[in-house]
Amino acid sequence: MLNYNFPTHWPSADELPDSDETPVDNELQELIPGLLKAILLILWAERMDWFFCIDMGLYHHPEKPPIVPDAFLSLGVQRFSREELRPSYAVWEEKVMPIFVLEVVSPTYRQEYTDKLEEYQRLGVLYYVIYSSSRRDRPHLEVHKLVNGKYELQPGNPVWMPEIGLGIGCERGNYSGVTREWLYWYDADGKRYLTPEEQVKESALRAQQESLRAQQEAQRADRLAERLRELGIDPDNIS
């Protein structure tokens, strides 16, 4: 929870602009966080204390323009604030600063490593994640954790985030018919959580395997019954 003493007359999310009318630079800025959200919707389906948003205005002061991360995650807030859902995210209403912010670096440099890093650090966002698949001189995924008021780059891929109960990492896979490197959530042992498509395929495979096992059991039972009849034993009268 935030410790700020917000005045009661500050505008609500309904009164604030819900878009800065700035389009995303490329499709990946939508698809990459979209995959993360799709996994969370299944993984945390029973939880109602989280909010993951893509390209939404994050208002931290009513007299300043919003920050619009590619995605952010807040914990300890209502997942659905109302039937019409949130038009924007005002921290003085929610009383919770996002714990996780994601920026996907586009060909048009948008100060992800400078101004935005300093801004999220100042606001107290615990994890600031930057992903760039085009960089050759540094890792594609950078997870910065706020430690004593300063961001520290966390080693590894994936990186476990205990305060969230998830790890985040990147590896090659397929999503929306595209095979490339994607961001995924991971458990504490570094095992990747499946995408919705993978879960559907896994469920279908399990059902197929169960059906095959049932057929094999039925065939074994038929063979056993036939053998008993050959021995003069009625299998239907065996107690």
Image (spheres, rainbow, N blue to C red):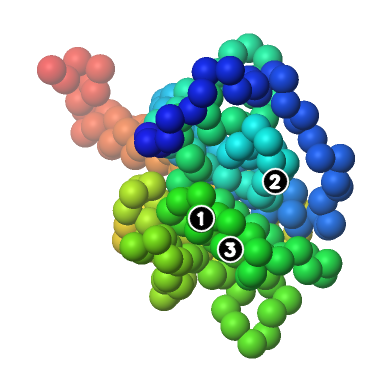
Q: Separation of disc 1 and disc 2 at Cα?
A: 16 Å
Q: Earlier in the sequence, mark 3 or mark 2?
A: 2
Check residue 122 in the rendering and tell me which mark sits there, or answer none: 1
Q: Position of residue 74 (x, y in %)?
A: 48, 38
Q: Position of residue 152 (x, y in %)?
A: 42, 70
Q: Residue furthest top?
A: 83
Name which residue type carries label 3: Leu
Q: Earlier in the sequence, mark 1 or mark 3?
A: 3
For the residues bearing labels 1 and 2, Cβ distance under 8 angstroms: no
Q: Separation of disc 3 and disc 2 at Cα?
A: 13 Å
Name which residue type carries label 1: Arg
Q: Earlier in the sequence, mark 1 or mark 2?
A: 2
Please tell me which residue lies in front, 144 or 160.
144
Check residue 226 in the rendering and tell me which mark sits there, or answer none: none
Q: Is residue 151 above or below residue 14?
A: below
Check residue 117 in the rendering and tell me which mark sits there, or answer none: 3
Q: Separation of disc 1 and disc 3 at Cα?
A: 9 Å
Q: Is residue 67 above or below residue 140?
A: above
Residue at position x 40%, y 51% from top? 166
Mark 3 closeness class: few <14, some 14–19, many ≥20 residues within 10 Å: some
Circle 1 SS class: helix
Residue under label 2: 68
Please tell me which residue lies in front, 9 or 85.
9
Name which residue type carries label 2: Val
Please tell me which residue lies in front, 148 or 171.
148
